Image: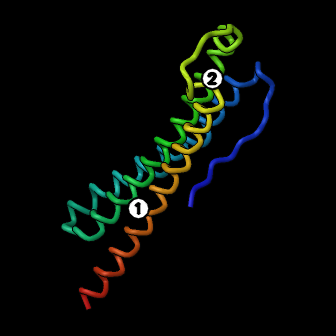
Amino acid sequence: MYVNIGYTVKFEDVPKTVEKMMSEDIGASVVDGVLDKVEDSIIAIREQNIDRTIQLIDETRKNLMLIDAQLSNCFDILSGYQKEKLGVNSQPEQQPAGTDLSSLQDLQATRDQLLVRIADLKEELGQVDMENEEDASR
């Protein structure tokens, strides 16, 4: 299960915080979760181990979904930072009804929660599929 977390940093520390997220969290996920699994998948397919290859490809896809969600968070954080830095949010504008900043933030939070839930459901489905395959092979 994946969850979104939030914490407070000084405005000027936002880029450094996102850099840390990208280098530590996302960078590690790419190396450990994707590159290694792709290499293992290649080895498994060369060995004609189709079941293992399918499993590794599925694990790689799940890791890519997590990386995508993390990159989306970085994108949203830096977009908000840039808007604030440029003074976009401090200029009064006439906005159409339902498009105020809090509504957009609510939509983004809902989207993030849905992405996490989709990843969880896909993971659960993968586990059920593997159990069904094991039962079928017996």
Q: In the rendered image of this protein, does residue 76 appear above or below residue 88?
A: below
Label count reads 2
Amino acid type at circle 2 is Gly
Instruction: Give the residue at mark 1.
Output: 122
Above or below, 21 relative to 48: above
The residue type indicated by label 1 comes to Lys
Say which quarter of the image contains residue 60.
bottom left
Q: Which residue in the structure is indicated by mark 2? A: 80
Give the image quarter of residue 46.
bottom left
Q: Residue furthest bottom?
A: 138
Q: Within 10 angstroms of label 2, few (less than 14), some, or many (20 or more) residues?
A: some
Q: Secondary structure at mark 2?
A: helix
Per the model, the C-alpha gap separating discs 2 and 1 is 30 Å
Is residue 10 left or right of 132 when viewed as pictured? right
**Residue 29 in the image: x percent, y percent?**
51, 47
Q: Position of residue 108 (x, y in %)?
A: 56, 37
Location of the N terminus by quadrant is bottom right
Closer to the chain start, of discs 2 and 1, is 2
Q: Is residue 55 above or below residue 87?
A: below
Q: Secondary structure at mark 1?
A: helix
Q: Position of residue 51 (x, y in %)?
A: 26, 71
State the mark number for residue 45: none
Q: Residues within 10 Å of mark 1 (few under 14, many from 20)?
A: some
Q: Quadrant of the C terminus?
A: bottom left
In the image, residue 56 sits, relative to residue 130, either above or below, namely above
Q: Residue at x 67, y 23 (%)?
A: 15
Residue drawn at x 66%, y 20% as measured from the top left:
81
The residue lying toward the viewer, choosing from 102 and 79, is 102
